[in-house]
Image: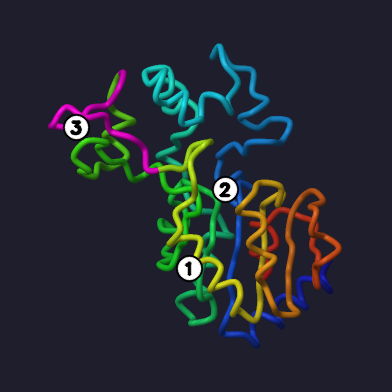
Amino acid sequence: MNEKIETLRQWIDKSDNIVFFGGAGVSTESGLPDFRSDDGIYKANYSFPYPAERMLSHSFFMSNTADFFDFYRKMMLYEDAKPNNAHLKLAELERQGKLRAVVTQNIDNLHQLAGSKNVLELHGSCWRNYCMDCGKFYPIEAVSKSEGVPRCSCGGIIKPDVVLYEESLENDVISRSVEAIRHCSVLIVGGTSLSVYPAAGLINYYRGNKLVLINMSPTPYDSSADLLITGKISEVFSQL
C-alpha cells in the first residue's frame, strides 16, 4: 500500500492536468449513506411502502409527489454533513493548479463546501431547486424546511435539481466531463463501483496511461487500471 501511495504522490507532483471522477464512496466518510452497499439506501429497512429506486423515479415524482418528498427529505438530505479529507485534498490540488475538474455522481455539494470550483455534477445537486412552472430557483431550505409538496410563490411545484431515474443527464455536463477526461494526464477514480451508466462509461474516454482506481470493493474496470488501490478514499488522500 505504501508503495502505491508513493506512486500516486509522484504522479500528482508531476502533473498539472488531473481530473477526479468520484461516486458515493467519497461522501460516505462524511456520514452520508451510499446506495448499493449492504447498509445503503436501496437495502435500508425503512417504513416506506415502495422500493427506493421506484421512489426516486420521474414517474413516481409526478404521480406520488407528496410521498416522493417525504422519502426525499428523510433519506436524501444531509445539510449538516461536512467535507472529509478527500474533498479537502481535491480542493487543495485545484488551488495549486494541478486539478482541472471534479466529475461527481454525488448531489451533496460537499466538493463545493470544501472549496472546489470546477465541479461537474452528473446527477445534479439537492442544494439547487427550481419551480417547474416559472423556473425560479430556490435553496435547499425551500425543500428541507417545508412540509408536503413545496410550492413556489407562483404556485408551481419546487423540484430538486437532481437527475431522477427515467431522466436524462444534462448534455452540457456530459460534454464538459468527456472533454476533461479525454485530455487529462492523470485520471483518479474513487469511491464508485463504476456500475451506473452512462456515468461509469465516461472513463472510457481517457487516453492517458495513469488511470488510478481507489475503491473499497472491486469494479469492472480494475483490470484497466494503471494503479489500483483498495481502501477508503479519504484515508488514501490523507496520506498524499
Q: Is 224 in front, or is 201?
A: 201
Mark closest to the chain's N terminus, 3 or 2: 2
Picture quarter containing residue 7? bottom right
Task: Say which quadrant the C terminus sits in.
Answer: bottom right
Magenta stretch?
148-161
Residue at horizontal 36 percent and vertical 38 percent from the top:
160
Residue topped by disc 2: 27
Could you tell whether 44 is left or right of 149 in the image? right
Front of the two marks 3 and 2: 3
| Image spot of residue 203 (x, y percent) | 67, 64
Residue topped by disc 1: 176
Residue at horizontal 36 percent and vertical 44 percent from the top:
127
Instruction: Give the CA separation, mark 3 to mark 2.
Output: 30 Å
Helix, strand or loop at label 1? It is helix
Could you tell whether 235 is left or right of 173 in the image? right
| Image spot of residue 92 (x, y percent) | 50, 72
Mark closest to the chain's N terminus, 3 or 1: 3
Q: Judge whether 50 appears above or below 173 on screen.
A: above
Q: Are marks 3 and 1 in contact (CB under 8 Å)?
A: no
Amino acid of disc 3 = Cys
Front of the two marks 2 and 1: 1
Q: Judge whether 150 appears above or below 202 on screen.
A: above
Residue at horizontal 21 percent and vertical 30 percent from the top:
156
Q: Is 73 in front, or is 78?
A: 73
Q: Are marks 2 and 1 in contact (CB under 8 Å)?
A: no
Amino acid of disc 2 = Ser
Residue topped by disc 3: 152
Residue at horizontal 82 percent and vertical 70 percent from the top:
2
Residue 157 within the segment the image draws in magenta: yes
Report the residue that reaches farthest toward the left: 154
